[in-house]
Amino acid sequence: MCLRKGVRKTMKVAQFRKNKWNNPWLVVFLSRGSKHQLSTINSVNLSYYMKINRPQLVGAVVTLLAATQANAALINGEINFAGSATLNQSASTATSIVAFNNVTVGYGTQEGAYATTVPLDGDAVTFGTFSFSSGGSLSLSPNPVTVWSFNDLGVNYSFKLTSVVSADVSVHNKVPTLSVEGFGMAHIDGYQDTPGDFTITLTGKNAHVTFGAASYAPVSHPSGPVPEPSSWAMISGLGLVSYSLLRRVQK
């Protein structure tokens, strides 16, 4: 296998033209014998060095970005919330949460990936309503449900609930407390989506209650294992990109 005439064997540099592609992503292809690497760099025009058409190049970049995202760290941490809610019945007999109000991130309760430099304390949070029981059996509806989400300084945080594993009622001083627990996927921009645990505890004499909630990650999900570290995905992604580029420089 030899390289097309006029292409340096030690380095072939490529770039998307900003005036044509309006895209700052640049691709560098390094060739030293049989060793190949990919990285990003500001350099010269891709089409000058390699005859690669737009679909191939877009596919290569998308593959590289997907592999990079897959190689992000798993979420490891805890976050808590507080607010008020409305149940479809009293806490002792309720089967669904029909409204949430004034939900915020709890003060001083974040750990791990949620313990940011600028504290998330007091951030307003959107909670999604859901049913956790039907016909006397545990059942999540809708499934899945984004049970909480918020944005802090441009970073998105959320938790998608996919199952309910318990819904228990206890009574203290004649006031019932309903505790619901389930599993799902935690999301933070820049991290891998990670299986996690969600709990919510609702207390009140009638359908209008106060609550505390928490999410933890990672945990083992009952319907599937924690995703493996994706070094293989990264290697596969880079291999596909290399193959796409190599096809165009071979004679």
Image (tube, rainbow, N blue to C red):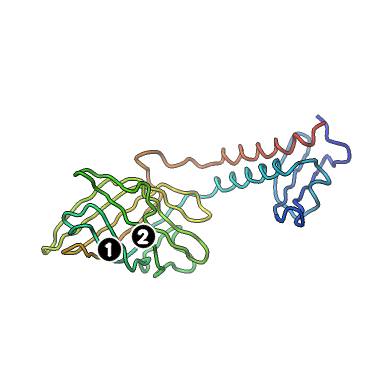
**Helix, strand or loop status at disc 2:** strand
* Spot occupied by residue 33 in the image (x, y as percentages of width and height): 78, 35
* Spot occupied by residue 215 in the image (x, y as percentages of width and height): 36, 55
Which sits earlier in the primary sequence, circle 2 or circle 1? 1
Is 190 drawn above or below residue 239 in the view shown? below
Q: How many marks can you see?
A: 2
Q: Residue at x 17, y 54 (%)?
A: 93
Question: On residue 85, which mark appears?
Answer: 1
Question: On residue 127, which mark appears?
Answer: 2
Horizontal relation, residue 150 to residue 49: left or right: left
150 or 186, nearer to the observer: 150
**Helix, strand or loop status at disc 1:** strand
Outermost right residue: 6
Say which quarter of the image contains residue 89: bottom left
Is 56 drawn above or below residue 109 in the view shown? above
| Quadrant position of the N terminus in the picture | top right
Q: Residue at x 85, y 36 (%)?
A: 4
206 or 187, nearer to the observer: 206
Question: On residue 238, which mark appears?
Answer: none
